[in-house]
Amino acid sequence: MADGSPCRRSDCEVARTGVCALGNDPIDSCDEYEADEAALETGEDEDKLEAEERPVEPKRLLHRSDMLTRSELWSMQQAQPTTVVSLVGDVRVGKTTLIAALYASFCRGPFAGYSFRSSRTLTAFARRLHKVLVRSDLALPDTDRTSRQDGVGFLHLTVVDPTGPRSLLIADRSGEDFQAARSDTSLIAALWELPLADRICFILDAGKLANPETRAGYKRRFKQQIWALLNNGAVSENAALEIVTTKLDKLAPKPSPEPVLDELAKFESEILEELAAVGRTLGIRRICAMPRSNFEVGRIGLQELFQGWLMPRPPKVITPEPAVSPARWVDRMLSR
């Protein structure tokens, strides 16, 4: 064996070249190969000693930071009070754009009187915002629409103000699901997130309302969507309802003989009156989350919308109604 070489053959240069002279691969499969066991044993002992002296670090659970599923909601809602918001609307009405705009607002700093604290879905937020950024190299800002194959997921956001932290869960479902449920009410039962929501936002597309060719049909479908959910018990009686009109830049003043803003106000009033007749109140919001048609409009209405979502709701009345002519004497004593 040559000095410093692990091979017994004098003509083997495995120590210099790393190649066995007999062509064995791996090298230690060669019968002539002999590693320095003493050195190996010493190294193993040193590694073992260092491992014993090294303090054991506690294992940390890293969240996947993507959309939350139904199984993950219970533990989160039990950990802290959480407001659940569900966005209801057809394809391309601006649901994903609204979510991306809210996340982008907190990326710049405090927003609407709140500061960002934490989020379990940062990756999901970032994916929705990516195409809006300059680095996406798009001529106009855009967002990917939610696919029907994705099902429903929840985006989580915890913010804080001087009164303490507030947590928000935003349900994100494809508009195709809502369109299908509107046409076939038997599918409404699959919209399981709606009964859990504290606030239902019906997203109204101002662009379709501004177009005289699509206006009448779109108004009819929009009302049909609201009544289909209400009449089939998909919305909790304690849930706050509101219409959120998006894409206000499409209603910016233009050389047109028809006052589109008046048309919007008239349509909102019609829905308010119809719901008031059945004892339901409705909030009205108008926003422009990402101007495209008229950049001078800018982003408007987001702060008021977000503040409304986190506004404390009155506590639910859980006192049972008094029994009418109860059969038990103990129940009759309570009435006296």
Image (cartoon, helix red, strand yellow):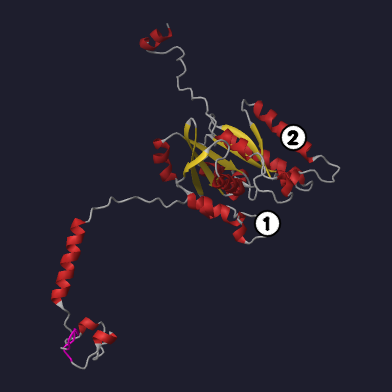
Instruction: Tell me which numbered mark, 2 or 1, is placed earlier along the sequence.
Output: 1
Q: In the rendered image, is residue 248 in sight?
A: yes
Relative to 54, does residue 45 appear above or below in the rendering?
A: below
Image height check: is 84 above or below 280? Answer: below
The circle drawn on residue 182 is none
Place of residue 95 in the rendered image (x, y in percent of width and height, measured from the top left): 60, 46
Q: Residue at x 17, y 89 (%)?
A: 2
Amino acid type of disc 2?
Ala
Q: Which secondary structure dominates the residues rendered in magenta?
A: loop
- Residue 140's label in the rendered image is 1
Q: Position of residue 311 (x, y in %)?
A: 55, 31
Above or below 21: residue 232: above
Q: CA distance from mark 2 to mark 1?
A: 29 Å
Instruction: Specify the quadrant of the image occupied by residue 18.
Output: bottom left
Locate the C terminus by quadrant: top left
Please give the residue where the numbered disc 2 appears in the rendered image. Answer: 265
